[in-house]
Amino acid sequence: MEIPKFLIERYQFWKKNTFEDYKDIYEQASKTAQKPIAMIITCCDSRILENTIFGGSVGDYFIHRNIANIVPSKDDKDQNIQTLSAIEYALKVLKIQNLIILGHSNCGGVEYSYKTFFDKKNISDFEYINKWTSCLKNSYNNIPNNFPETEKITFFEQESIKQSIKNLREYDFIEKLINENKLNVVGLWYQINSGVIKFLDNNNSFIDLD
Ligand SMILES: [Zn+2]
C-alpha cells in the first residue's frame, strides 16, 4: 500500500491552515453530540460539493451518497438497507428535521440507467450497478416520448428526485414524521455548469432557488 503524494500534501495543508483556523470548533465538536441541521442525500459524483454550496461547517450536514442519489422503494428490499439505515439513524437518533435529496445535471448514473432501460442490449457487465439503477425504472417510465434526447435525461434526473421523495413516504416512520410536521423533505436539482439550483415546489415542479 502506498499513500498517494497528493493525499499527504493536501492533508498537511489542511492541518496547517483550515484546521488551525477552526481549531476551537473542532474541539467543541468533539465534546458534544453531533446535531446536524440537515441530512443530504446526494450522488457519489465528485463534482457535487454540497458542503461548499451550502456553506457547511463542522457538524452541519449529515451526508449520505450513493449513485444517482436514490432512495429505494420499500419494495426494493435487496437495495434499500444502506440508504435506509443512514436515514433511520438521521431521523430516529439525530432527530434531523430537514432531509434534502440533492440530484444533479450530467449524472452518469442516471444516464447509464437511461441507456440500459432504453436499449437492453446496451447493459454492461455491472452486476451491482445494474441492480442499483433498476430502482429508477418507475422514473424512466414517466419520461415523455416526445421530449428531445437531451431534455429526457434532465427530466429523468428530476423525475428520480420526485420518485425518491415518494419512496421515502412508503416507510412508516418517515411518513409519520412528515405528517406530524417533524420532518421537512426537500428535493433539489443542481446544474453543474451554471451553479443553478432548482427546488421541487408544492406543485411538483422544479423552480429556481434564488
Ligand atoms: Zn450523479
Image (cartoon, grey):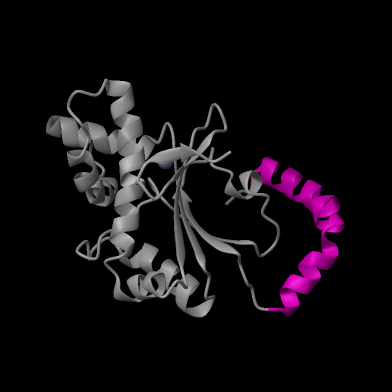
**Picture quarter containing residue 116?**
top left
Decide if residue 183 is on the left or right side of residue 139. right
Asked whether 94 or 11 is in front, the reply is 94
Residue 71 makes an appearance in the image: no
Chief SS of the magenta region: helix
Image quadrant for the C terminus?
top right
Q: For ligand 1, which image quadrant applies?
A: top left
- The x, y position of residue 85, in whole percent, is 39, 70
Residue at horizontal 26%, vertical 66%? Answer: 170
- The x, y position of residue 198, in whole percent, is 48, 39
- The x, y position of residue 53, in whole percent, is 62, 44
The region drawn magenta spans 4-32
Which residue of the protein is positioned furthest toward the front in this rendering?
203
- The x, y position of residue 93, in whole percent, is 50, 79
Decide if residue 15 is on the left or right side of residue 186. right
- Say if the magenta span includes residue 25: yes
Residue 179 makes an appearance in the image: yes
Residue at horizontal 52%, vertical 75%? Answer: 95
Residue at horizontal 34%, vertical 56%? Answer: 165
Asked whether 162 or 30 is in front, the reply is 162
Decide if residue 100 is on the left or right side of residue 120. right
- Using the image, determine if residue 24 lies above or below residue 71: below
